[in-house]
């Protein structure tokens, strides 16, 4: 009997031990799950699963994403997958992660910076002995854009110069020849002769999008050590602005304002004095703009002339030393409902013809003072900037259809053969 009781007791012990071990397994599983949820140490498999189910990573800002990667989350950014220093995909951060190297902006800078030059404008001045000597009057920037040593820059960088000196970041210095300059667009081309000149490719500014990363390179404040670098994004496209008046007439040729520029790229990459004429580049190292203006009345607003606007002007300057513009022969002012009521004009968006060159194409074709130009060849004209853009994209001799609204309520289409704009 004691033996039978002993077997029963032994069976009970086995049952209790089995239940205990099963309970420990559940507790261990529970503790592992709790540790994973609270950020404790886990296996790689558990970490991967937790990461895959964390929506915050995919919705994070570039900075947040960079910080997450720094904590060794297994998922990789587009930049990481492309390789260290590769240009990031749209929306990805350009801030390098630990172990990635200097990052894409630094790599673009290393590629482009050798072809960004310093241009010194020297002009004759009388010294204390009443002798004429060449004195530096200003310093700007430029970019070498072909193997013949042509340098694209701003007109106001070279205006009035008796001598131009170009210095490369590698320390070489060359006297420069002025190929041509165009006050109307504030662009100029100079040329240097040298061997192994670094050439920067021109890009396509029509492919730019707002928010895209860009890098501005130039000789800010003429500081020693070569071109400096600022980075930012494309803030806006298609801007129109008028430069301040240049007392020497270098930018405008008139005392009332500087060059009237259109199709500008607005960027928050800092553009400081000395940056004028330097390149605005994309992360592929292509020139997409020529840095020209910084807004003095605002923070982080600068403007660059789109390279698609600058390229044909540079080509004309190289070919003939000058740029010929189409000429309509009108003076205009932006129309508004208030002006329309006050002067009994057509209440239509457009530009008011305030003056006519009696021998100009518009007058010969039949345009009249107080007409409101609303379109040219079907392109809407809502302001002076639109009119300037259409004319700048046209050539002398082009026949265009000018749509005008008249005070009597009539709309007319008038054929005009554009002339050549007078110089000076």
Image: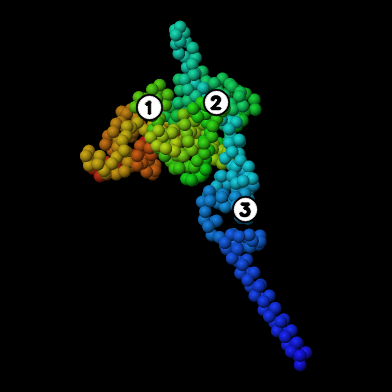
- Decide: few, some or many residues near mark 3? Use Cα within 10 Å; few <14, some 14-19, many ≥20: few
Q: Residue 43: name its quadrant.
A: bottom right
Point 72% across, 85% down: residue: 9
Q: Which mark is drawn over residue 14?
A: none
Check the image and report above or below for 62 versus 324.
below
Point 40% across, 37% down: residue: 298
Position of the C terminus by quadrant = top left
Q: Residue 112: name its quadrant.
A: top right
Point 54% across, 32% down: residue: 228
- Per the image, the residue denoted by label 2 is 224
User: Residue extending furthest front?
Assistant: 2
Point 52% across, 31% down: residue: 218
- The x, y position of residue 60, in whole percent, is 52, 54
Q: Which mark is drawn over residue 245?
A: 1
Dot 2 falls on a residue whose secondary structure is loop
Camera-side mark, 3 or 2:
3
Camera-side mark, 3 or 1:
3
Most foreground residue, 248 or 373: 248
Camera-side mark, 1 or 2:
2
- Per the image, the residue denoted by label 3 is 72
Position of the N terminus by quadrant = bottom right
Check the image and report above or below for 123 versus 320.
above
- The x, y position of residue 418, in whole percent, is 39, 33
């Amino acid at each position: 009997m004691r033996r039978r009781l002993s077997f029963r007791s032994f069976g009970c012990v086995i049952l209790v031990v089995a239940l205990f071990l099963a309970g420990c397994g559940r507790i261990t599983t529970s503790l592992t799950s709790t540790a994973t949820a609270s950020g404790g140490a886990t296996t790689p498999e558990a970490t991967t699963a937790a990461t895959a189910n964390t929506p915050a990573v995919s919705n994070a800002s570039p900075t947040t994403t960079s910080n997450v990667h720094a904590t060794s989350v297994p998922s990789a950014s587009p930049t990481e997958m492309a390789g260290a220093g590769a240009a990031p995909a749209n929306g990805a951060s350009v801030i390098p992660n630990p172990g990635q190297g200097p990052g894409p902006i630094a790599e673009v800078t290393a590629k482009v910076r050798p072809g960004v030059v310093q241009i010194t404008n020297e002009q004759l001045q009388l010294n204390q002995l009443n002798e004429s000597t060449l004195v530096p009057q200003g310093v700007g920037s430029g970019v070498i854009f072909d193997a013949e040593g042509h340098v694209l820059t701003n007109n106001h960088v070279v205006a009035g110069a008796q001598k131009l000196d170009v210095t490369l970041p590698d320390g070489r210095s060359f006297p420069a020849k002025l190929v041509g300059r165009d006050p109307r667009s504030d662009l100029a081309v100079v040329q240097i002769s040298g061997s192994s000149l670094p050439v920067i490719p021109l890009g396509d500014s029509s492919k730019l999008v707002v928010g895209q990363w860009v890098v501005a390179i130039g000789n800010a404040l003429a500081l020693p050590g070569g071109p400096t670098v600022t980075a930012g994004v494309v803030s806006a496209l298609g801007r129109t602005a008028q430069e301040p008046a240049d007392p020497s007439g270098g930018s405008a040729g008139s005392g009332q304002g500087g060059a009237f520029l259109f199709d500008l790229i607005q960027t928050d990459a800092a553009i400081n004095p000395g940056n004028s004429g330097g390149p605005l580049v994309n992360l592929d190292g292509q020139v997409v703009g020529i840095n020209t203006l910084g807004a003095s009345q605002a923070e982080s607003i600068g403007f660059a002339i789109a390279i698609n606007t600058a390229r044909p002007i540079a080509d004309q300057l190289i070919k003939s030393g000058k740029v010929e513009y189409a000429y309509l022969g009108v003076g205009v002012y932006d129309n508004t409902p208030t002006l329309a009521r006050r002067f009994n004009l057509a209440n239509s968006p457009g530009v008011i013809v305030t003056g006519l060159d009696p021998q100009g194409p518009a007058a010969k074709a039949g345009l009249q003072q107080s007409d409101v130009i609303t379109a040219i060849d079907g392109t809407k004209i809502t302001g002076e900037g639109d009119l300037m853009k259409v004319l700048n994209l046209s050539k002398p001799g082009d026949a265009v259809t000018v749509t005008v609204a008249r005070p009597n309520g009539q709309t007319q289409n008038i054929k005009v053969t554009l002339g050549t704009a007078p110089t000076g």
